[in-house]
Every structure is written in structure tokens, then in C-alpha cells.
Amino acid sequence: MIAAYSSALATDSTNGVLNKVFQSWNQPFKPLRIVGNVYYVGASGVSSYLITSPEGHVLIDTGFEQTVPIIRENVKTLGFRMEDIKFILASHAHRDHTGGHALTKELTGARIVMSEADAALLASGGKDDFMDEVTVYRPARADRVVRDRERVTLGNIVLTAHLTPGHTKGCTTWTIVVDDGGQRHNVVFFGSTSVLAKLVNNSKYPEIARDYAATFRKLKALPCDVFLAPHASFFGLEEKAREVGTGKNPFVDAKAFEKYVVIAEQNFLKQLEKEQQGQ
Ligand SMILES: [Zn+2]
């Protein structure tokens, strides 16, 4: 196990070492329980979530390949075992969220579950991305492909995939209803809607603007009490982690997701308008 792990790390030469920004996202972060059986096990800036059950666990996002040792340590600290991870899911197939998929699969034997479009991107190691500047990583093969509204179940864990394309063609928002001391909460693992590519006349992704618009409609209709995202800064992880134990659960906030999506949509529309006027 350890040998495979070290040699895999050594082969992460695709883009060389992490650049300064990526490094700043990849600092160790103390793991914590967010709500019910949902835990934060990621690094300081790139999220990873562990959803636990007596039948095994689900991991959403693996960060960079260099994040995997942090995840591994965090899972152990919480008293769980990496080997009990049965499914590896993803927000979207960019290096900072699926760069560790290949290594995590090797370490756990878990099955990778992805949307069809992002399974293709993962298989290319990020190379087939539509962005001008692609960031490549160690490719991995998905073991199962999910469609919109399809469920992934493991013991009492039931996760639903919502395809929210735009940021990547197969960007996926996952939802789960968790029981937290008798209270039920709608948890949303947001896929991302940041605009990184041309919205008008994008020959590599002609339907990009239409996809984003449909994604925003879909996101606005999702019930959400606990907003979680692929980057810790999107939902204020650091601030919230400091409030844990001081009163009510800081992660339970029925307005947080809606507020985020409204601003994200405004940013998208501004960008679209700018591009349309520039023609
Ligand atoms: Zn991304």
C-alpha cells in the first residue's frame, strides 16, 4: 500500500509541483463533522467530504494528488478507515478536485462514479478540457457513469446527482438528506459555476451559455439547509469551523446557498453581456 502510494506521488510530474496558489489551497486542515454523517476531510482550500455508514463510506472530491496524504490523515484522525471508502464521487474533473482520484482508487479499491462528460475528462487527465489553459493530472477511469437525478446508495447513504454543466461539461452537484440528532437537513455539495471560458462563440463548447443558464435554474430549485462546495472559501469553512461548538451548528443556514447562487448568476450574466456587446 505505502509503496504504491509513494511511487504514485513520485509520478505526479504532469504539471510538476504545485504552483504557489495551488500550494496555498493544499495546506493541512483539521477535519470536522459538518452535520449528521457528513465530515470535512479536505485541505485548507480544496474540499473533500466523507459521508459515513456502517456499510462503508463515500468520498466526494480528492483534491490534487498531493491532497491525498492530507485526506488520509484526516480520515484516520476522525477514527475512520480509508479502506472503507467504497465510492469516490466528484464535483467536477479539474485537477484540484479529481487530481487525487487515481491514487485514492489505488489506496482504497473504491469505485469512481462520475457523469459521462466528466468521466471522459477524467480519463484524459484534464487534457480534453475546453479551457484555453488546461491543467493536466494523472488520469483515472470511472467505474460507473451517472445521469441526471440518478442515485448512488450505500447502506443508509443516498446521494443524488444533479448535472450542472458549464464550469465543466459534466459538472455535478450532489445532494443528500441527512439525519442530525432527529433533525433532517438537505445538504448540497455544489459543483461550481465559476466562468473560466468564453461564453460566446466558444467553438469547443458552443452550448456553454445555454448550459450555464439551465444550471442556474436547476440550482435555484434545490432545497438546501447546508451549503457545501468544492472550494472551502465558497462557503466560509474557516470561519464556520471556528464557530463549531459555540451554539447552533454554523453550517446549517437555509439562506447561504441561495445567496451564493444569486451572486454567481449575476457574475455569469455580466460576463455574458460583456462578451455579447464586445462582438
Ligand atoms: Zn474547477
Image: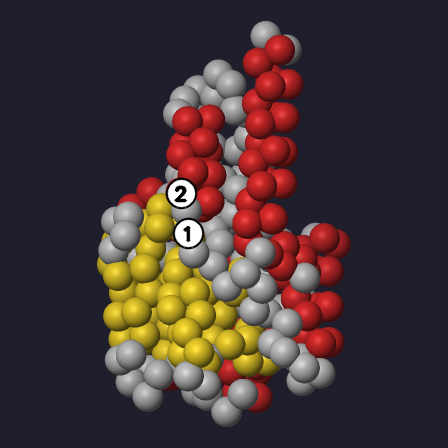
Disc 2 CB within 8 Å of nearest ligand 1 atom: no
Measuring from the top left, give residue 245's x and y in whole percent.
67, 84
Asked if marks 2 and 1 touch (Cβ < 8 Å), the reply is yes
Specify the quadrant of the image occupied by residue 152: bottom left
**Relative to 18, is 7 on the left or the right?**
left
Question: What residue is shown at x 63% (from left), y 11% (from top)?
Answer: 278
The amino acid type, in three-letter code, at marker 1 is: Leu
Instruction: Identify the residue position indicated by label 1 in the image.
Output: 222
Q: Quadrant of the C terminus?
A: top right
Is label 2 in a helix, a strand or a loop? helix
| Residue 91 shows in this picture | no
Measuring from the top left, give residue 166's x and y in whole percent.
46, 36
Residue furthest out toward the bottom: 79
Q: Eyeballing the image, is 212 above or below 198?
A: below
| Residue 15 shows in this picture | yes
Which disc, if any, is residue 81?
A: none
Q: CA distance from mark 2 to mark 1?
A: 7 Å
Disc 1 CB within 8 Å of nearest ligand 1 atom: no
Q: Quadrant of the N terminus?
A: bottom left
**Relative to 6, is 29 on the left or the right?**
right
Is label 1 in a helix, a strand or a loop? loop
Which disc, if any, is residue 218?
A: 2
Q: How many marks?
A: 2
Q: Eyeballing the image, is 37 above or below 114?
A: below
Q: How is the image coloured?
A: secondary structure
